[in-house]
Every structure is written in C-alpha cells, then in structure tokens.
Amino acid sequence: MDSPHPVVQHPHPLRIAIVTDAWHPQINGVVRTLTRVTEELEQMGHEVRVVSPNLFRSIPCPTYPEIRLALFPGRKLTALLDSLQPCAIHLSTEGPLGLAARAYCRRRGLPFTTAYHTKFPEYVRARAMIPLGLTYALMRRFHGDSAGVMVATPSIEAELKARGFGNIRRWSRGVDTELFHPRDKEGDKTLFHLKRPVHLYVGRVAVEKNIEAFLALRLDGSKVVVGDGPLLSELRRRYPDVTFLGTMQGEELARCYAAADVFVFPSRTDTFGLVLLEALASGLPVAAFPVPGPLDVVDGVGVGYLDEDLARAARSALAIPPQRCRDYALQYSWRRSAEQFLENLKPFR
C-alpha cells in the first residue's frame, strides 16, 4: 500500500545494519519481514548486515525456548558495528541486542530508527501478568530517541500516539503472490480427507495468539492448525478433533493455504498479521476479531468478516469469492515495503 512519505532516491548505495533479536531459525512475521525486505534492499543495490543472536552466546528465552536471547552482547556488538561502519542503523526489536545497539548509538551520537513489530506489553502480560503501564513505559523509553518508529498500520500508530509515542512512520508489509496463489482444493493431499469447510489457522501456537478462541469454536467441517510453539503438545491433547500439522514453509505451506476454505485469525495482539496477506493471496477469505491488524488489512474491503462472534465471522466469510481476496492481496508487494523502509531510515554517512 502507498506510503504517506515521498519516495527518496539515495544517490549512492547504503550500508545498512539491522539489529534484531528475532532471526532464523525462528519462524514468525518479524523474521519473514526482515528476510524479505533485506532481499529487496540487496536487489536495489544496498548492502545489508543483519546483527542477530546467531552471532553471540545466547540462552533460551524463559517460557519460549525456541527464541534465543543474546547474553551480554555489548562488547561484541560494539566491535561488529565499528568494523561494519554502516551508513544507517535500524533496531528491529526491544530485546538484549536492541538495547545494546541503542546504547551504542547514544554513546556515539548516531541517529537510529526502530520498529514496533510486536505488542510486546500485551505479550508479557499474557505470560507473566506484568502491568501494561510498566511495560509501555519501558517501550516509550526504548523508542523515545528513535529518529523514526516504524509501524505497519494506522491502528497501531493511533494506539502508540495515545500512549505517548512520537515520531511514528508507516512501514507496511508485502506478500509473495507468486508462491501464494489459488489452487485446486481437491488436489492437495494434506487436507483432502478432511470434512469441509476446512477452517485454517497459521501461526505460532502460543498463549499470546489467543488460539483457543479458534479451537473452542463450534463449527461445521474441520479445523486445521499449522505452526509450532510452547502450547502445541498441550493443545494436541486437549483438542483431538483438530488437525495439527506442525511447521510448514514454502510450497508446502502455500498448498495448505489454497486447500482450505476460510482463514481464522483469533489473535488480538498482532500489529499486522502477515498470514492475513498470505491467506488472501491464496484466495482464502479471513475471519477475525475487529482489532488492529485485521481492522487495517481486512475491514471494509470485502475480503473477510470481523466480528466479536468469531464463529459467525467464519461462517459469513465462506461466501466471499476467492478471486476478490486474491485481487486485493495483489496490492501489496515486498518491493514497496522495502522502499518504505528505506525512506524511513536516517543515514548518517
């Protein structure tokens, strides 16, 4: 989608450092976004160095061992950034690496940009019952010196402004419409044996995704979950009627989207929801709650239903023509997302 900022053409290629606590082998929207935007920036002639936990000693994140947290990264991160000599620095996450990079930039008087990928305070409250006010105060401090806080949607921008955040810039997302596209539903051997309609969820199997709001629905047909996470074993045991397929990527994931009948998105804490675009590009209508993310991507354009009654939204979405969903998703591209990212950077060399 179009950016509110004019396109800035940099006369020379930039050397960009992206510091992130979320990186491969994690599978989530942050990692997918950074991977695809990095690829696009490199195709545009820029040099991108991703500084991630893979480069440091790390420990498993409490309650979420799939995520690794860099251990005392300050000295090594300083050496890495000094040797890299970037033209611009972007801090993607508010974890140990993001904090260390923020301190580095402040010591040297260098401008930096940040991103608000995740409703981190809500995630923390879901796991540890820490008050939102405290965590948002820490978030305001982290992003307070940013030359631009990149957010994906108008709803999240409005929420952050209401909580005292400033200097917000829009950074939308894209989708690979060559990989994700409508296909013959009967030709997929993963889902062909299931009773229709097939209701699909793709994402982390974790408490902050509110996945049980989907699993507990009374719906005709079948429910399918694609993804991994800390709740997977427990939910497999508690919901034996649900088909849990584990992690899927690439062509296998694309076939699964296209073989389903409706995409159910129960999360109330996502800032965008890349899976919404992947589903729509596959011709799959969306059912979701009327919250940020779905409100920005789906509401009012005829490609899904948003309702506090998620079962009613799922039943209503089944009537939406797949081609309408596909046509809408074609408006989003990773090249435009990378251009927006570039516009928002604050080069200092």
Image (cartoon, rainbow, N blue to C red):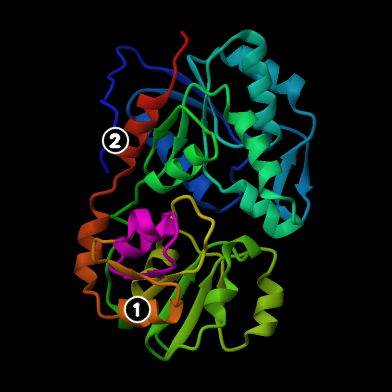
Label number found at residue 118: none
Residue 205's place in the image compared with 347, above or below, is: below
Q: Earlier in the sequence, mark 1 or mark 2?
A: 2
Residue at label 1?
261
Residue 235 lies left or right of residue 202; in this view the side is: right
Toward the viewer: 255 or 174?
A: 174
Is residue 281 part of the magenta span, yes or no?
yes
Q: Is residue 260 visible?
A: no
Start-end of magenta stretch: 274-299
Q: Position of residue 19 (x, y in %)?
A: 59, 30
Image quarter (top left, top right, bottom left or bottom right) of the N terminus: top left
Place of residue 298 in the rendered image (x, y in percent of width and height, measured from the top left): 32, 60
User: What kind of element bears circle 2?
Assistant: loop
Q: Specify few, some or many for label 1: CA neighbours under 10 Å numbering under 14, 14-19, or 20 or more.
A: many
Residue carrying label 2: 3
Up the image or down, 263 lies above or below 189; here it is above
With 325 as the anchor, is 51 left or right in this view? Answer: right
Above/below status of 90 relative to 204: above
